[in-house]
Image (cartoon, grey):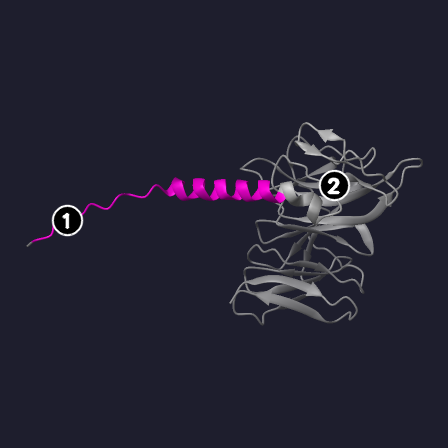
Amino acid sequence: RVSQPVMAMEKDPNYDDTVEERIINEEYKIWKKNTPFLYDLVMTHALEWPSLTAQWLPDVTRPEGKDYSIHRLILGTHTSDEQNYLLIASVQLPNDSAQFDASHYDADKGEYGGFGSVSGKIDIQIKINHEGEVNRARFMPQNPTIIATKTPSSDVLIFDYTKHPSKPDPSGECRPEIRLKGHQKEGYGLSWNPNIEAHLLSASDDHTICLWDVHGQTRDKNLLDAQTVFTGHSSVVEDVSWHLLHEAALATIRSS
């Protein structure tokens, strides 16, 4: 007996994505429904574009007579072939003395509960033109107005956000204060030395780690070469971090 050939059905590549998205949405709904039992405070806000990075800035403003304080954070955009930005945003967080109001209903989010007059919205205060998506952004601990960013190229960019207008140049031109050279590929790892001002480490897909002193002498206007390039890794260096207490100790993570 000769078996008949069976025609294999061609699998729709979009089917798995659709099913996965539906599962994610259902799990998110379950999580959101149970957040009052899991956390003291949850605030949600939909950004215009995804952000690959987020970091709180250290400054806090406490308006007189209000039951909230204003905190700021660094974000970045990851757009679909549109202009990307480095973002400085602000958000209101309730003070310890703020009263929880279970009767408050947010029609936009479909949520009950709130703290006094807290809006819960993230307001974008400053938008700075950026070359491609912002893989990571970190402020210098000794001077938080200085921000380093990782780009889709090999360059690391240094911005002083006080030297940029709140609204970006319509031309889309990216104008960092310093452009750091040393890598051959992009990456994500970025760490300022908490003990030595202006010393910055960067990890890259090119298997290296670069060290710069951003107070160093630049060449060709705003270009600054790496002070040291560490080449001990044999694969992609995913992340890097300075030791919090030891000024010369660092840790790295590489792909296996």
Neighbour tally class for label 2: few under 14, some 14-19, many 20 plus, Cα within 10 Å = many
Question: Residue at 63% of width from left, 46% of height from top?
Answer: 134
Q: Distance between the residues labelled 2 and 1?
A: 62 Å
251 versus 192 height, above or below: below
Amino acid type assigned to the residue bearing label 2 in the image? Ile
- Decide if residue 221 is in sight here: no
Residue 106 is situated, as x and y percent measured from the top left of the image, at 71, 30
Decide whether residue 255 is among the magenta residues.
no
Decide if residue 135 is on the left or right side of residue 217. left
Identify the image quadrant of the N terminus: bottom left
Q: Mark 1 points at which residue?
A: 5
Q: Point out the residue furthest to the top here.
A: 107
99 versus 214 height, above or below: above
Residue 119 is situated, as x and y percent measured from the top left of the image, at 77, 33
Amino acid type assigned to the residue bearing label 1 in the image? Pro
First of labels 2, 1 by sequence position: 1
Decide whether residue 8 is among the magenta residues.
yes
19 versus 220 height, above or below: above
Residue 53 is situated, as x and y percent measured from the top left of the image, at 65, 48
Neighbour tally class for label 1: few under 14, some 14-19, many 20 plus, Cα within 10 Å = few
**Foreground of the two, 10 or 256:** 10
Decide if residue 227 is on the left or right side of residue 72. left
**Foreground of the two, 129 or 216:** 129
Question: Residue at 72% of width from left, 48% of height from top?
Answer: 39
Decide if residue 86 is on the left or right side of residue 102. left
When asked about the image quadrant of residue 132, the answer is: top right
**Foreground of the two, 180 or 188:** 188
Q: Where does the magenta region start and end?
A: 2-31
